Image: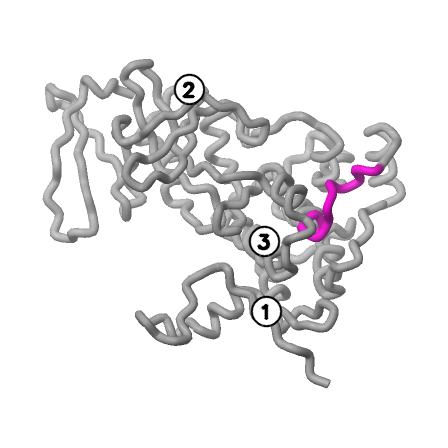
């Protein structure tokens, strides 16, 4: 990639005022580079480094090493990652990242260039904490509706990847993130392929991660993850959402013994007391050793959207169900308009 000092920015007039185009050209003008705008997924955005306020170099074991930064105008937190190799701005792999935009997937903003350190960086959304941290910290305070919404969010993000023929291959509670609006976001493995040269952020095969891996992959380390193995991992995530601990965290024997029991004795974690029966039925199908029993992401979303969820003496509706009912009412100042994810409706049971 060319250094910023070798480029000049030429604004391009566009009849649509919602677009902002820049054509970055070599100073000699013999070659052109186009970058994406806010609404053009076929052009890659080069974010000027001076719009970023870099705070510090950070390291999180769930994300790796990155620069912690903010966008100056919006104050939004972002993470600046150092790609393993120079980025080809017209590469199809990079352009694909622009097209993979979904509300439940970590947002890819574009790339930037640090003139001082002569380095390229990938700009990604920086979530506050991962799912494991969030559940551990708030397990006693999280409402059942919030837990169901998290399960719905994670499944929605995974469904989007699967519809784009992308296998996640590394889904677990430490690479699912929760933002300030309690929205769950999953990582896009394609981004971390560009950053690290592999799709996984965490290669450490510890007990916590082993428990999320499909038994077929544990049996055969040469087998590649597929959509069915993602569904197995999602099932364990769904179990974890209603638990205050990681799967098999109380298991006292060594890792080899745990794998042996998972494979040969087909052991799985037991449901927690406050988990709805219908929810248990969904994830137990999904971690079944019989692949025919495993649901698709679309099946899971359909099951999660059916009716109300019983919990003690109240019935709960998912926020997504409420939005669907109020969709025709999305008018400014309409008395039924709901704009927040903090929506949870309880009603007394009918006797």
Q: Residue at x 58, y 31 (%)?
A: 62
* 186 relative to 283, above or below: above
On whether residue 249 falls in the magenta region, the answer is yes
Q: Position of residue 129 (x, y in %)?
A: 55, 39
Instruction: Identify the residue at the far front of this view.
Output: 141
Quote the CA–CA distance across marks 3 and 1: 13 Å
Q: Could you say whether the residue bearing mark 1 is in a helix, strand or loop?
A: strand
Q: Position of residue 208 (x, y in %)?
A: 72, 35
Observer-nearest residue: 305 or 60? Answer: 60
Is residue 331 visible from the viewing direction of this image?
A: yes
Extreme residue in the bottom direction? 351
Upstream in sequence: badge 3 or badge 2: 2
Residue range highlighted in magenta: 238-250
| Quarter occupied by the N terminus | top left
Q: Earlier in the sequence, mark 3 or mark 1?
A: 3
Q: Is residue 301 on the magenta stretch?
A: no
Please report contact status of discs 3 and 2: CB closer than 8 Å, yes or no.
Answer: no
């Amino acid at each position: 990639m060319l250094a910023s000092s070798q480029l000049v920015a030429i604004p391009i007039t566009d009849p649509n005022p919602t677009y902002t185009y820049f054509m970055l050209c070599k100073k000699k003008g013999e070659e052109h580079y186009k970058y994406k705008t806010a609404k053009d997924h076929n052009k890659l955005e080069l974010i000027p480094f001076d719009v970023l306020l870099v705070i510090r170099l950070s390291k999180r074991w769930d994300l790796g090493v990155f620069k912690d930064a903010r966008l100056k105008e919006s104050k939004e937190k972002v993470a600046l990652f150092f790609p393993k190799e120079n980025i080809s701005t017209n590469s199809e792999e990079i352009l694909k990242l622009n097209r993979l935009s979904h509300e439940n997937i970590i947002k890819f903003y574009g790339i930037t260039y640090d003139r001082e350190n002569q380095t390229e960086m990938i700009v990604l959304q920086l979530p506050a904490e991962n799912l494991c941290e969030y559940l551990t910290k708030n397990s006693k305070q999280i409402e059942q509706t919030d837990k169901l919404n998290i399960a719905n969010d994670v499944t929605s993000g995974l469904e989007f990847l699967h519809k784009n023929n992308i296998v996640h291959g590394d889904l677990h509670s430490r690479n699912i993130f929760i933002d300030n609006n309690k929205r769950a976001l999953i990582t896009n493995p394609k981004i971390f392929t560009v950053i690290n040269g592999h799709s996984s952020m965490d290669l450490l095969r510890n007990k916590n991660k082993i428990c999320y891996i499909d038994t077929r992959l544990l049996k055969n380390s040469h087998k590649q993850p597929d959509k069915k193995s993602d569904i197995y991992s999602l099932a364990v995530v769904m179990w974890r959402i209603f638990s205050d601990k990681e799967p098999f965290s109380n298991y006292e024997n060594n890792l080899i013994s745990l794998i042996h029991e998972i494979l040969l004795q087909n052991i799985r974690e037991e449901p927690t007391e406050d988990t709805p029966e219908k929810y248990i039925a969904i994830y137990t199908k999904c971690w079944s050793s019989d692949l025919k029993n495993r649901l698709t992401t679309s099946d899971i979303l359909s099951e999660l959207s059916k009716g109300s969820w019983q919990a003690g003496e109240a019935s709960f509706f998912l926020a997504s169900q409420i939005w669907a009912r109020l969709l025709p009412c999305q008018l400014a100042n309409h008395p039924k308009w709901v704009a927040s994810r903090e929506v949870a409706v309880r009603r007394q049971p009918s006797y």
